[in-house]
Image (cartoon, rainbow, N blue to C red):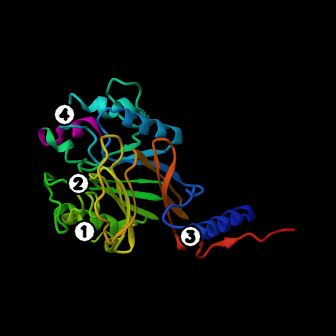
Amino acid sequence: MNHLKTPSQIITLITLLVSLAALPAPTQAAIACPGGVQFAVIGDYGDASQAEADVATLIDSWNVDFILTLGDNNYNDGAATTIDANIGQFYHAYIAPYTGGYGAGAATNRFFPALGNHDWNTNNAQPYLDYFTLPGNERYYTVTQGSVQIFVIDSDPHEPDGRTATSTQAQWLQTQLAASTATWKLVTMHHPPYSSSSIHGSDETMQWPYAAWGATAVLAGHDHTYERLWAEGIPYFVNGLGGRSIYGLGAPLPQSIFRYNNDYGAMRVFASDFCINYAFYNRSGALIDSYSQINPAYLTNKTFLPFIQ
């Protein structure tokens, strides 16, 4: 069905297109894609630190629709005795059902974590699986929010269904991506396929053909840095500055576009049928990096109302 556009909407779209085309790289102005959802992305955050508290306060100020995590939710060992202090203390208002001791939870779940290596350190990640109520087998799953479908995978070697590109888990991802009708298809995990940190670096086992399978972008943590990369025709992000510690940077990769490790922070993402914008802010609220993708199909086969003088 064609969608009618008013003159004011046309002006908004044209203005946004012109603005996006004029933005310099690598650091751009953050774009609020109109009419969509807004969410935050954090990684390597869960140790009840002041830095985690600062990042959580920043996210609360954005009034996001939901939060994605990129693993290492519960330092050091994923234990049941630390999980509520490390997660619920700061993010209980997004979690449902929430049974911890830090206040009321959300009416519906708005917190979608990925497993990290520290979450696996205790009893096959059982405290994590007990604490959250997530779709599927809870280790890897998919959820749709507005125009975005998120595919959370478990990149840890402990994953029972494997983590190679031919594993049962990878076959699930390929099938789910192929079936998706979402405008934006984001794959999230802990171990980064590409990273130029001096600590961990790229995890070659996780270099699956995400773009060929239909992914829009790939987001990971594990390295406590922020990095935007470009591989196989799509953006990759490393986002591990959620509060634990900060890692050094090694030599940039051929895929590296932008790197940062001066302070903690989080990503703020706006997504509509027309565009998606990924922006990283430090905990002081300063915009560090921003990148946008436009959906050209949005303007295809549309009917526009004429301007009336």
Dot in front, 4 or 2: 2
Say which quarter of the image contains residue 151.
bottom left
Marks 4 and 2, Cα distance to the nearest angstrom? 24 Å
Q: Going by the picture, which residue comes out furthest to the right? A: 309
Magenta stretch in the rendered image = 123-133
Could you say which disc has been placed on residue 79 in the image?
4
Say which quarter of the image contains residue 174.
bottom left
Which residue is at the front of the view, 237 or 135?
A: 237
Mark 3 secondary-structure assignment: helix
Q: Amino acid at mark 1?
A: Trp
Say which quarter of the image contains residue 167.
bottom left
Residue 129 lies in the magenta-colored region: yes
Marks 4 and 3, Cα distance to the nearest angstrom? 46 Å
* Residue holding disc 2: 199
Kindly identify the residue that appears in the image at 87 percent across and 68 percent down.
309
Q: Earlier in the sequence, mark 3 or mark 1?
A: 1
